[in-house]
Structures are given as C-alpha cells and as structure tokens.
C-alpha cells in the first residue's frame, strides 16, 4: 500500500497561483453548470488534483515530450493537473459532452495551458491518430473501449487507469497499486500495457 500526502505532491509539481486559478474556475463553473457533486469542497478538489499527479510521483509519467489522450475528461481530472505539471506532454482531452468540452476550452484559455480539446466519442477518432499514453478516471472498461483504444494506440501504448481493478483478460500486462491519499479511502491506480 502506497501512502501519499496531497500537500507534498501539489507543492512538488504545481505552481500555487495556477492551481488556485484552476480550482476557482472549476468551482465557479460547477455552481453555474453542475459539472460534479455540489458537495465537493475546495479541499476535496485539491485532493483530486493531487491524486491526478500520482502517475508523475510514481514516475509512470514525466515531463518528457510525448502525446497523451485523456478519455472522458469531464472537468479536467486528471488531464489538466498533468498539463500544468508536465507542460512538454502534448495532452488531448476527449470529452463527449458539449457543455464539459466548452468548459475545458475555457480552462485551456484562462490557464494558458497547452492542450487540445476534442468534443467526440472515442470511436469517432481518426485511426491515423496514434497515442503512446492514455489516461482514464472512473470510466468503465469493456471490450469495445479496449478495441477503440487499440485502433489509436502505438505498439508500446500504456493506459493509466484511476479506478477499480482493471480486467486482466483484456490486456497484456497490468501493474496495479493500492494507495491512500490523505484521509480518502483506499484507491487503485493501474498501469496497463496493451
């Protein structure tokens, strides 16, 4: 079991001014558009930002230049914190909801981060687009999703999955880690090789 401290992770990887701008934008948008639970506080959101950076802390991701596709980006977790912490990564956020994709565009402009936002379904991506890294947070893994990722994955592609245990039979290799971050319940993160 790994244990992480959100303050230490945030201090290590993020500019505090940029983090405050991000949290303020997310809270403002949530009050207007109900992007996520209204019960989440700024402290909860800060924990989710720190949790987004666990792949960097584990050295599964770093600031080397490569492409990353975040599937089901929602309001930007984990992709926006990753873009802030690792600006050399060419991050694409894939979000099928127009409202959330528009919010992500606004975030990109206001925070001046390098990211591409696509308002599409995963299956609509051009097969000529190839990604070596994928991230997903709490998106259900099924055979259709794996097939769609496979169409746009490079030969050595990896998926970093925040969620329950990924099904072993759909992948070549899975490295899963149980962890706690601050007071949150035990969680899982997996590095999956296609």
Image: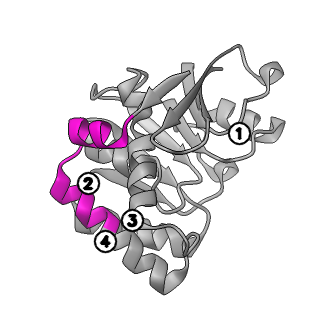
Examine the image and state in which quarter residue 62 appears. Answer: top left
Q: Which residue is mark 2?
A: 113
Q: CA distance from mark 1 to mark 3?
A: 35 Å
Q: CA distance from mark 4 to mark 1?
A: 34 Å
Q: Main secondary structure of the magenta part?
A: helix
Report the span colored magenta. Answer: 5-23
Determine the secondary structure under disc 1.
helix
Is 7 colored magenta in this rendering?
Answer: yes
**Quadrant for the C terminus in the image:** top right
Q: Are marks 4 and 1 in contact (CB under 8 Å)?
A: no
Report whether residue 130 is seen: no
Mark 2 nearby-residue class (10 Å; few <14, some 14–19, many ≥20): some
Question: Closer to the observer: label 4 or label 1?
Answer: 4
Rendered position, 132 above or below 136: above
In the rendered structure, the answer to whether residue 79 lies left or right of residue 119 reads: left
Q: CA distance from mark 2 to mark 1?
A: 27 Å
Q: Which residue is mark 4?
A: 24
Examine the image and state in which quarter residue 63 appears. Answer: top left
Question: Closer to the observer: label 2 or label 1?
Answer: 2
Question: Closer to the observer: label 1 or label 3?
Answer: 3
Q: Which residue is mark 1?
A: 148
Determine the secondary structure under disc 4.
helix
Q: Are marks 2 and 1 in contact (CB under 8 Å)?
A: no
Q: Earlier in the sequence, mark 4 or mark 1?
A: 4
Measuring from the top left, give residue 167's x and y in whole percent.
Answer: 79, 27
């Amino acid at each position: 079991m790994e244990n992480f401290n959100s303050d230490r992770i945030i201090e290590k990887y993020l500019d505090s001014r940029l983090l405050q701008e991000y949290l303020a934008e997310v809270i403002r948008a949530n009050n207007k558009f109900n992007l996520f639970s209204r019960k989440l506080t700024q402290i909860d959101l800060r924990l989710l930002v720190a949790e987004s950076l666990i792949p960097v802390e584990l050295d599964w991701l770093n600031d080397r230049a490569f492409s990353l596709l975040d599937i089901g980006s929602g309001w930007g977790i984990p992709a926006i914190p990753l873009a802030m912490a690792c600006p050399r990564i060419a991050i694409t956020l894939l979000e099928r909801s127009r409202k959330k994709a528009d919010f992500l565009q606004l975030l990109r402009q206001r925070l001046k981060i390098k990211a591409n936002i696509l308002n599409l379904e995963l299956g609509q991506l051009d097969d000529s687009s190839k990604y070596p890294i994928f991230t997903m947070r709490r998106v259900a893994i099924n055979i259709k999703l794996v097939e769609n990722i496979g169409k746009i994955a490079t030969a050595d592609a990896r998926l970093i999955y925040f969620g329950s245990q990924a099904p072993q039979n759909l992948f070549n290799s899975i490295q899963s880690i149980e962890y706690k971050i601050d007071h949150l319940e035990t969680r899982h993160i997996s590095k999956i090789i296609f």
